Each structure stands twice: as structure tokens, then as C-alpha cells.
Image (tube, grey):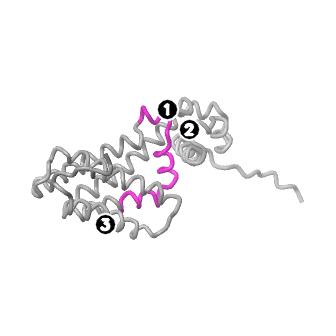
Amino acid sequence: MAADNRRTHRPRMTASQRREQLLAVSRGLFAGKGFEGTSVEEIAARAEVSKPVVYEHFGGKEGIYAVVVDREVQALTTALTVALGSGGHPKVLLERTALALLDYIESSEDGFRILVRDSPVAQATGTFSSLIGDVATQVESILEPQFRAAGLETRTAPLYAQMLVGMIALTGQYWLDARSPKKTEVAAHLVNLAWNGLHNMEKKPVLTKMSH
């Protein structure tokens, strides 16, 4: 019987498919090793392509990293904006914001790890801290009328907005590795501290004499 000379070939990827493959491979490497720890050689090897293919699509490691970061920033920004823009009682908005961030971490662990890492490229494309700052600005607009109604100084609303969003973000980083307790319980505890703290704030807080 004649030998079967047919060979199995993988279908050739289109340029768009190849680009998405390279992004997926790079995303995993950046999440695990960081920007500095990842090389074009490794990206190419994982994708089973030559180095020139990576350069052809992205111009180098910086280019591919910038696209990965931009996609993650857009995904998280969209989730948080929806949570903050849907209206409702301020406490409910706080709950939605906490859950939106935890949802993102749960569904996009690699992406979150990339966003919270420091990188020279991230400074140009948008760091996690700058993203959190954007969210804090939205929270500020929610806090101001609440402060006004409670007789609190509205000029301090930006400061408290940074505190609230920063608290949620840092807790999210902790939960990324701990994954305990469950997501809804973490969100409830976050809101418990934030809301009850805001609800009972002093109008003119001062440090105790012991702290001086």
C-alpha cells in the first residue's frame, strides 16, 4: 500500500488573527514576568513565529505592551464608568464600584496584574494610578452634593474621593492573591468601612493631642 504523503498543516493565520495571537501570548508573559522580564525572543517562541513577525506587527516590545495596556485600561474604565453612571443612592453606587473592580480582577487576572505593575511604557500609555485618578474624579462629583447636604466642606471631596477609590483598588490587589473571602463579602466589607465612615464623619476633624 502506498504511503500517505499528506501532511497536516495548520491553516495560515490572517494578519488580524496573527496580531491577536501575539497580543494573547504577550499578555500572559507580561502578567507573569513584567515588561522588563519579557523579551521579543520569548514572545516569538511562544507564538511559534520568527522575531521579524513580532516587529512587523508591533514595532517591538514597547508597541505590543502599549496595546495590551490600552485594552485593559479601556475594559476597566468601561466597567467602572457603567457602575458609577447608572444612578442611585450613593451607597449603592459605592457597592457597584467595588463589585465592578472585583469582577474585573476575577475575569481578567492577567490584565489586572499588568495594570498594577510599574513600567516605563505604562507611564506613557496610562498607569493604574492614573486610571484610578480618573475614577476618583467621577466619585468626586458624587461626593460633593452629599458633603454639601451634610454640612461638610465640599473642598475636601476630591481628597475623600481619592481615599475611597484607592482603598478599593488596594484591597483588590490584596484579593487578587488571597481570593478569600468571597467577592461579594469583600465588597460588603469595603462598603461597610467606607460608607459608615462617611456617614459619621466629623465636620472639623483634628488629630488627637497624643498624635502631635
Reading the image, the residue beneath label 2 is: 35
Pointer 3 and pointer 1: residues touching (CB < 8 Å)? no
Query: Circle 3: is it few (<14), some (14-19), or many (20+) Cα within 10 Å?
Result: some
Looking at this view, is 185 or 9 the one in front? 185
Dot 1 crowding, Cα within 10 Å, few <14, some 14–19, many 20+: few
Residues tagged 1 and 2 counted as in contact (Cβ below 8 A): yes
Q: Is mark 3 on a helix, strand or loop?
A: helix
- The residue drawn where x is 88% and y is 56% is 2
Residue at x-position 49% and y-position 58%: 176
Q: Does the magenta stretch include residue 114?
A: yes
Q: Which amino acid does label 2 sit on?
A: Phe
Quick one: label 3 or label 2, which is nearer the N terminus?
2
Left or right side of 22 for 184: left
Q: Mark 3 points at which residue?
A: 192
Residue range in magenta is 99-125
Q: Amino acid under label 1?
A: Pro
Q: Which of marks 1 and 2 is nearer the N terminus?
A: 2
Q: How crowded is the residue under tag 2: few (<14 C-alpha within 10 Å), some, or many (20+)? A: many
Q: Nearer the viewer, residue 12 or 117?
A: 117
According to the picture, the residue beneath numbered tag 1 turns out to be 120
Q: Which of marks 3 and 2 is in front?
A: 3
